[in-house]
Image (cartoon, rainbow, N blue to C red):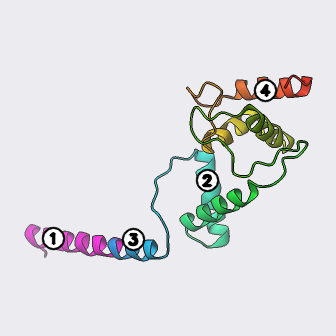
């Protein structure tokens, strides 16, 4: 029978070993050029990330990193139906809203048959500000822009 004092010592030893493993893993990853970040993603995105991680038999961090790198490499592509090259000019902060680029991005995502909510979620996830820069993209705002694009009111 293990006494309470012995159990506490065992627990503290396990915690210490776990912390040491975490420090070693972190140092190994940093040596490979990785940076640690924390992100909040939607439940659907988390579910898809889990599925992709299991399908590829890779850790979620690797899958997410690969997805981000792939998206960044696609930024230079020609936006369908427009002659605008994004060239990594996608706005990242409030106050850098560029209507032509944002509307072209919305047009591109709409052409991929994403819903207004999915487009809004993507714009928010990419850090693209709204025209005012004061709040997140909403599906109604995206819908209004798509309607104006269809009417030719650019």
Q: Is residue 15 magenta?
A: yes
Q: Is residue 125 magenta?
A: no
The magenta segment is 1-22
Ranked by sequence position, the earlier of labels 3 and 2 is 3
Ranked by sequence position, the earlier of labels 4 and 3 is 3
**Foreground of the two, 141 or 76:** 76
Q: Secondary structure at mark 3?
A: helix
Where is mark 3, residue-wise? 26
Is mark 2 in CB contact (under 8 Å) with mark 1? no
Measured in 3D between alpha carbons, the distance from the residue under mark 1 to the one under mark 4, in whole angstroms, is 63 Å
Measured in 3D between alpha carbons, the distance from the residue under mark 2 to the one under mark 4, in whole angstroms, is 30 Å
Where is mark 2, residue-wise? 47
Ranked by sequence position, the earlier of labels 3 and 1 is 1
Ranked by sequence position, the earlier of labels 2 and 1 is 1
Measured in 3D between alpha carbons, the distance from the residue under mark 3 to the one under mark 1, in whole angstroms, is 28 Å
Where is mark 4, residue-wise? 145
């Amino acid at each position: 029978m293990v006494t309470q004092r012995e159990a506490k010592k065992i627990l503290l030893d396990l915690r210490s070993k776990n912390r040491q493993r975490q420090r070693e893993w972190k140092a190994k990853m940093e040596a490979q050029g990785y940076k640690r970040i924390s992100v909040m993603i939607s439940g659907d995105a988390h579910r898809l990330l889990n599925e992709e991680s299991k399908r590829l038999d890779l850790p979620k961090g690797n899958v997410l990193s690969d997805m981000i790198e792939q998206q960044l490499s696609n930024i230079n592509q020609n936006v369908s139906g427009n002659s605008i090259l994004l060239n990594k000019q996608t706005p990242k902060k409030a106050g850098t809203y560029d209507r032509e680029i944002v509307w072209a991005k919305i047009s591109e995502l709409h052409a991929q048959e994403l819903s207004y909510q999915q487009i809004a979620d993507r714009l928010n996830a990419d850090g693209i500000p709204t025209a005012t820069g004061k709040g997140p993209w909403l599906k109604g705002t995206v819908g209004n822009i798509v309607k104006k694009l269809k009417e030719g009111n650019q």
